């Protein structure tokens, strides 16, 4: 069950990459929601692993879990960034600046 969430998150990351590689302006709101979904899937992976399989989790390389935690933080920050881009495109400049500021803070903050 835990790895299903991990693989779903990875698949969504590939979908985001595909959207960003295509020429033209992407739908920033959609990309932001996809990035938020990636963060939720990865977070669900870690919490399920901790609650249902602590024995297996202890056997995993700690660097892998550090990478997953880093990825969660990056996806949350990128989600806020794309939200800010979407708001800027909709001429909501004040809210966009606030969302971009929050994205910057999210990138600097580490959660475990």
Image (spheres, grey):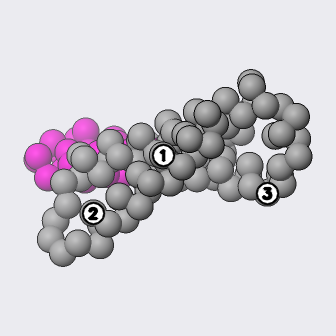
Quarter occupied by residue 33: top left
- Element marked by disc 1: helix
Q: Which residue is drawn at 83% across and 39% down?
A: 56
Is the residue under label 2 in contact with that under label 3 (CB below 8 Å)?
no
Q: Nearer the viewer, residue 24 or 53?
A: 53
Reply above or below: 3 against 52. below
Q: Which of marks 3 and 2 is nearer the N terminus?
A: 2
Label 3 crowding class (10 Å Cα cut-off): few <14, some 14-19, many 20+? few
17 left or right of 24 in image:
right
Where residue 54 appears, x then y in whole percent? 83, 31
Q: Mark 2 points at which residue?
A: 19
- Please tell me whether mark 1 or mark 3 is closer to you in this view: 1
Q: Mark 1 points at which residue?
A: 8
Identify the residue at horizontal 15%, vertical 42% (top origin): 92
Q: Nearer the viewer, mark 1 or mark 2?
A: 1
Mark 3 secondary-structure assignment: helix
Q: Spatial distance from mark 1 to mark 2, Cα to Cα?
A: 17 Å
For disc 3, the marked residue is 63
Of callouts 1 and 3, the N-terminal one: 1
Q: Is residue 67 visible?
A: yes
In x, y percent, where is residue 66? 73, 52
Q: Is residue 111 left or right of residue 91?
A: right
Q: What stretch is highlighted in magenta?
A: 76-100
Mark 2 lies on a secondary structure that is: helix
Q: Is 19 colored magenta in this rendering?
A: no
Most foreground residue, 54 or 94: 54
Q: Can residue 100 be seen in this view?
A: no
């Amino acid at each position: 069950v835990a790895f299903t969430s991990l693989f779903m998150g990875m698949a969504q990351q590939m979908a985001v990459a595909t959207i960003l590689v295509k020429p033209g302006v992407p739908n920033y709101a959609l990309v932001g929601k996809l990035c938020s979904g990636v963060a939720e899937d990865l977070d669900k992976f870690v919490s399920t692993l901790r609650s249902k399989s602590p024995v297996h989790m202890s056997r995993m390389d700690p660097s892998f879990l550090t990478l997953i935690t880093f990825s969660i933080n990056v996806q949350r920050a990128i989600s806020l960034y794309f939200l800010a881009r979407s708001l800027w495109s909709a001429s909501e400049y004040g809210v966009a600046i606030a969302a971009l500021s929050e994205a910057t803070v999210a990138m600097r903050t580490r959660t475990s």
